[in-house]
C-alpha cells in the first residue's frame, strides 16, 4: 500500500457533496435523500487515505440493542485492490467498535456487495444466503 495512511474520522456536513458524487458515479446507484441517513448524512465514519476521503458507512441506531450498518459507499476512482480492501476492513472495524461503544449487542447489515459479504463471513457474521428484497415507501 506504498505510503498509504488510512485514517478514520466522523463524517462531517461538508462531506455530503463528495458522498453524493460517489453514489451517483457507481452504476445502478443514486444518492439517497440526505434526510434519510443517520444524522442527516453525518451519522457515520469516513476513511481517508493521506487526507483524501475514500470510503464511508453509516450507523442506524434503534431503540434496542441492535444497530444497522448501512450505506457503505466508496470513491469509484480509488484504485488498487489491496488499498480498497484495506480501507473497507478499517471502515467496518471502526463502525463495529463504534456500535459496541453505543452499547449495542447486535449488528444488522444488508448488501449484495461480494467484498462486504466475504469480509462479514471472515469476521464471523452469520450469512442468510436466501435472496432478500428491499421495500421502501416515501411518505
Image (spheres, rainbow, N blue to C red):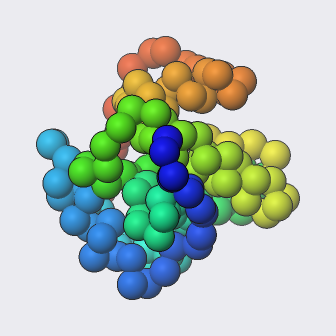
Q: Nearer the viewer, residue 61 or 11?
A: 11
Percent across and percent down for residue 32 are: 29, 62
Residue 29 as seen in the image, left or right of residue 107: left
Q: Nearer the viewer, residue 123 or 85?
A: 85
Percent across and percent down for residue 36 are: 39, 68
Which quadrant holds residue 127? top right
Which quadrant holds residue 89? top right
Residue depicted at x 58% and y 72%: 10
Q: Nearer the viewer, residue 118 or 100?
A: 118
Residue depicted at x 39% and y 84%: 14
Residue 69 as seen in the image, left or right of residue 95: left
Can the viewer see residue 73 in this picture? yes
Q: Nearer the viewer, residue 13 or 38?
A: 13
Can the viewer see residue 38 in this picture? no
Q: Residue furthest top?
A: 129
Note whether 133 is above or below 20 in the view shown. above
Amino acid at each position: 500500500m506504498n505510503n498509504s495512511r488510512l485514517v478514520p474520522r466522523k463524517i462531517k456536513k461538508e462531506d455530503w457533496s463528495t458522498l453524493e458524487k460517489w453514489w451517483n458515479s457507481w452504476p445502478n446507484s443514486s444518492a439517497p435523500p440526505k434526510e434519510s441517513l443517520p444524522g442527516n448524512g453525518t451519522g457515520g465514519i469516513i476513511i481517508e487515505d493521506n487526507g483524501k476521503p475514500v470510503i464511508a458507512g453509516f450507523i442506524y441506531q434503534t431503540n434496542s440493542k441492535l444497530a444497522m450498518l448501512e450505506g457503505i459507499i466508496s470513491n469509484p476512482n480509488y484504485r488498487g485492490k489491496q488499498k480498497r480492501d484495506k480501507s473497507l476492513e478499517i471502515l467496518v472495524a471502526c463502525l463495529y467498535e463504534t456500535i459496541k461503544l453505543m452499547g449495542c449487542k447486535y449488528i444488522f447489515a444488508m448488501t449484495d456487495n461480494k467484498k462486504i459479504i466475504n469480509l462479514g463471513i471472515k469476521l464471523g457474521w452469520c450469512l442468510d444466503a436466501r435472496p432478500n428484497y428491499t421495500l421502501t415507501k416515501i411518505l
